[in-house]
Amino acid sequence: MNLKSENMILDLLVQTDAEGIVELESTAGRVRMIPFSGTVTGPLFQGRIEPCGVDTQITNAADVRHMSARYMLTGVDHTGSPCHIYVQNEAWFSDGARPRPWHSVPTFITDSAVLAPILQQGTFVGEGIRDEEGLHIRFYQAD
């Protein structure tokens, strides 16, 4: 997938809470819940990932992994107005593996009057990649 840097709308630097990870394993599969927080930059929004974020990874008996992360961003939109953005980010990986980089499908809800027409009506692609800073989740406008 060729994602263009000029289409990037948000860049999240994620900090996981390793001590807060909860896991279970059963005959139906594995579940891993990873709490996280972090920072957000981008042309539309600057702020932070609230520490209530959680990435739930469910790997079924066929070794297909479903990642479902839900989190709240708090900060300011590009006009300087305070706002929130709720993010639901979904991805699926076969054979339990996660490609590098991996891609996802995010959806957004916001209380920003200027961001709502963009985030709540657009189509976006997420990309997760590790670099020297840590784990980045980048969202790109697809339409």
Image (cartoon, rainbow, N blue to C red):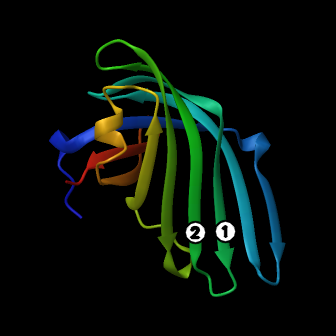
Residue 26 locus on image (x, y percent): 83, 77
Question: Can you say whether 127 is above or below 47 in the image?
Answer: below
Query: Do residues under tags 2 and 1 come within 8 Å of each other at their CB atoms?
Result: yes
Whether 45 is drawn above or below 92: the answer is above
Q: What residue is at 41 percent from the left and 38 percent from the top?
A: 132
Outermost residue to the top: 80
Query: Rounded to the nearest whole Å, what is the CA distance between mark 2 and mark 1?
Result: 5 Å
Q: Which sits in the foreground, 59 or 70?
A: 70
Residue density around tag 2, few if under 14, some if 14–19, many if 20 or more, within 10 Å: some
Question: Is 18 displayed left or right of 71 in the figure?
Answer: right
- What residue is drawn where x is 44% and y is 44%? 108
Residue sitting at x 49%, y 53%? 89
* Disc 2 secondary structure class: strand
Residue at 64% across, 62% down: 57
Q: Which mark is residue 139?
A: none
Structural crowding at the residue carrying mark 1, measured as other residues with C-alpha within 10 Å and reported as few (<14), some (14–19) or many (≥20): many
Disc 1 marks which amino acid?
Ile
For marks 2 and 1, the one nearer the N-term is 1
Res 116 quadrant in image: top left
| Quadrant placement of the C terminus | bottom left
Q: The residue under label 2 is which amino acid type?
A: His
**Name of the residue lying farthest toward the bottom:** 62
Residue 84 appears at what percent x and percent y?
50, 27
Give whichever of 97, 28 is nearer the camera: 28
Q: Quadrant of the N terminus?
A: bottom left
Q: Tell me, for residue 66, which label it has, or none.
A: 2
Query: Does any portion of residue 64 appear in the rendered image?
Result: yes
Residue 134 seen anywhere in this rendered image of the structure? no
Q: Which residue is the site of mark 1?
A: 58
> Is residue 17 left or right of 120 when viewed as pictured?
right
Residue 12 appears left or right of 95: left
> Whole-percent x and y of residue 28?
77, 82
